[in-house]
Image (tube, coloured by chain):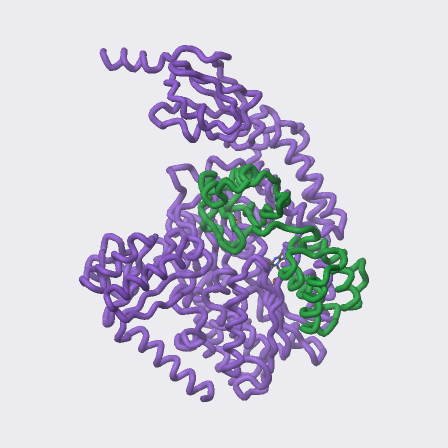
Amino acid sequence: MDVKTGNKLQEIFPRYKGRPEELIPLLQEVQAELGYLPEDVLLEISHFLKVPESTLYGVSTFYAQFKLNPVGKKMVRVCRGTACHVRGAAKVLEEAEKRLGIKDGETTEDLEYSLESIACFGSCALAPVMVVDKEVHGRMTTARVKDVLGNSK
Amino acid sequence: MNFEERQKKAIADWEELERGARPRIYIGSATCGRAAGALKLVGVIEAELARHNIQADIVHVGCIGLCYLEPLVDIVKPGRPRISYANVTPRNVGKIIEEYLVNDNPSPELALGVLSETALDGIGRFSDLPMLKPQVRIVTANCGIIDPEKIEHYVGRGGYGGLVRALGMTPEQVIEEIKKSGLRGRGGAGFPTGMKWEFCRKAPGDTKYIICNADEGDPGAFMNRSLLESDPHSLLEGMLIGAYAMGATEAYIYVRAEYPLAVERLKLALKQMEEWGLVGDNILASNLSLHIKIKEGAGAFVCGEETALIASIEGRRGMPRPRPPFPAQAGLWGKPTNINNVETWADAASIMRKGAEWYAGHGAEKSKGTKTFALAGKINNTGLVEVPLGTPLRKIIYEIGGGIPDGKAFKAVQTGGPSGGCLPASLLDLHVEYESLAQAGAIMGSGGMVVMDEDTCMVDVARYFLTFTQSESCGKCVPCRVGTRKMLDILEDITKGKGQPEDIDLLLDLSEAIKAGSLCGLGQTAPNPVLTTVRYFRDEYEAHVREQRCPALACKDLIAFYILPDKCVACGICLRNCPAQAIAGAKKMVHVIDQSKCTKCSTCLDVCPVKFSAVAKVSGEQIEVPGEPTPVTALERDKVAASK
Ligand SMILES: Cc1cc2nc3c(=O)[nH]c(=O)nc-3n(C[C@H](O)[C@H](O)[C@H](O)COP(=O)(O)O)c2cc1C
Ligand code: FES
């Protein structure tokens, strides 16, 4: 683990009591800080909370939110919920894949963009929906995907 | 200041704001408002006010539910009622403000309605809008009206009055009151809330927990998000009442990770409650103590199920366990626990404020009160509505929802998310109640209603839901883990035209087995979308299986696009736009699609000018067209026709 990551963890850990039930919030905070959960960081957390490594692996792979590999600086998420599905989400996802040159669930090689599909953002009234980082874009069309993502490839 | 003094002040301040001496501008800035560009308006509005040297208050409010009209901006001039403007843009907002506040012209042509008893200057009443008129707003009464970040607004409109009333009663009386109201769980199953509270109250143990289920995982549902963002104190008040009734001292709110604004507002609301002495020890100097924590979900649908949710709070994989024991006996950390949905908690607050009889005066025989529904999909007025239970589907979809866009035909409405079903046009007169929906094969669910039109393929919808449940199945029990996978395989085959005639019955058999054998609600209800689509739309399945035809022209593997030689004028638009370079053609030569290259993206159909309409989409048939570009005939024929 590099020094910077180690320091980050030393900053975060004191905010927790070191109890097993803190695992998920702790993983969330560490991921928010580092972008993803590297293996050596997971091991560190396992020591800190006195939770077996197997449990840590189990939990971090169970929840869709946790990423075990680096993600892009920008997170592009396309909704595939029911409302978005019947309003053409598949085309929006396809266009985003084409623009970014990656498939659903992948990250560009330069670590600029990650693309993932999500079950529903709760903005179904504006379907189909795409979210870039925290900004929600409603009523998407393939043309609007171009506007939002530009020629990012 | 004690609570009573603060309450008095809040009420006076709210009235002052309503009557106020300064103009006020309200902006709907919940997530849908923001997605439609509400925050971009703020700067423009401020600049316009500054330009005219007008002192005005800008109030950020939540979502009134007219999501399709966002961004919404309301303007109040001193002594006049609130006027609402819809689909406001940075380009026209300045003009609207200038015209009204400076020139005293409320621009009736741009106004949506006035929020008052009477119409004004040619502007109709807001509450007479077709989408609002049939609504009864109890749980959403404050949504879009108050600033959700101000506890003063909530209290100023009667908030926490239900808690005060409850504290003046015994816990048993509170439970009795909830029972009498007829309130049933709004999270899906519709279990009577008062009874559930009683189980938890009577369960032995000193430490008891209550949990607010804000995991809202059903795709197409956003009732809870909207309430959390627009009126967070309402459910918090309900939780305090519940804690008092059940004797709980610890509480959790489990919110899904995809709702950052809701989490932000909840955190703020909790901080305000602390300042007001509404959370912690000896709330309002009573013997009620409650500590509330927020837990953010981590993206697992099954965590909406109560035992999985508990496992997740405990820091484990969110996998359900068999019941009994029910959470009321052994829940979080093995202690008695009561879980209710966001809306259920908020309803409890209204009931305590206004009384059980008043609440039970709304709704139907066995389904009392009101329920919020999220209208989405192929419907004109998308948004959030609240109606008395027992309202017919037709009224919700046509009167409130404004019917189907583009003159298309209604095909089905999907209620209850992945656990629910698709109801056909023949059931439009069904009254929305727990029992009637269950009889029809669907469920009330949490309130998502996704409308589908003639272009939606019901087999594809069933496949869509199975993709969802299959990937969200936690894998603990075999019927759900393997069964949903098998069903999905079959459905994928059918949508690709590779289905066998016996597949439909096989799907039904599998459905029964999965329903009977699964451990939790996820598996037990996962077959519902398939069962209802087979029950009501079997002909669509048959067409896919027997004729390799998709009647809705939606399944990619079963459709084809052709350019009609007698209509094509060789304008070249489709050729230039085809992303697969599958179109051949030249000047004055009829264009031709190379079927082996076509990806069926439908771009050619979308871009072909309506006046030519030269692209045809078909399924289960072939159109004879030349293999190579041939000279255009359409124009010549038109010329001939014109000269005659
Ligand atoms: C797979 C699955 C997902 C669920 N998701 C939710 C949910 O997102 N929100 C919710 O309130 N209830 C959900 N439930 C229902 C809960 O288990 C529980 O019945 C409910 O929270 C009880 O609250 P109520 O009585 O107020 O309805 C889900 C159930 C299952 C089986
Ligand atoms: S279905 Fe896409 S935001 Fe809900």
Q: Is residue B579 above or below residue B532?
A: above
Q: Could you tell me how many numbered marks the image carries?
A: 0
Q: Is residue B207 visible?
A: yes
Front residue of A147/B431: it is A147
**Residue B437 in sight from this viewpoint:** no
Image quadrant of ligand 1 equals: bottom right
Residue B178 position, x and y percent, is 54, 72
Chain appearing in green on the rendered image: A
What residue sits 62% from the left and 70% below the top? Answer: B252
Task: Report the front residue among B304 and B324.
Answer: B304
x%, y% of residue B480? Answer: 71, 48
Q: Quadrant of the N terminus of chain B?
A: bottom left
Give the residue furthest to the front: A3
Q: Residue at x 61, y 63 (%)?
A: B296
| Quadrant that contains the C terminus of chain B | top left
Q: Is residue B173 left or right of residue A26?
A: left
Residue B361: image location, x then y, percent: 43, 67
Q: Is residue B227 left or right of residue B317?
A: left
Q: Nearer the viewer, residue B207 or A10?
A: A10
x and y percentages locating residue A93 in the rendered image? 55, 41
Which residue is found at the position 45% from the left and 28% from the top? B577
Position of A52 with respect to A116 (left or right) is: right
| Location of residue B72 by image quarter | bottom left
What shade does chain B have? purple
Q: Nearer the viewer, residue B260 or B438?
A: B260
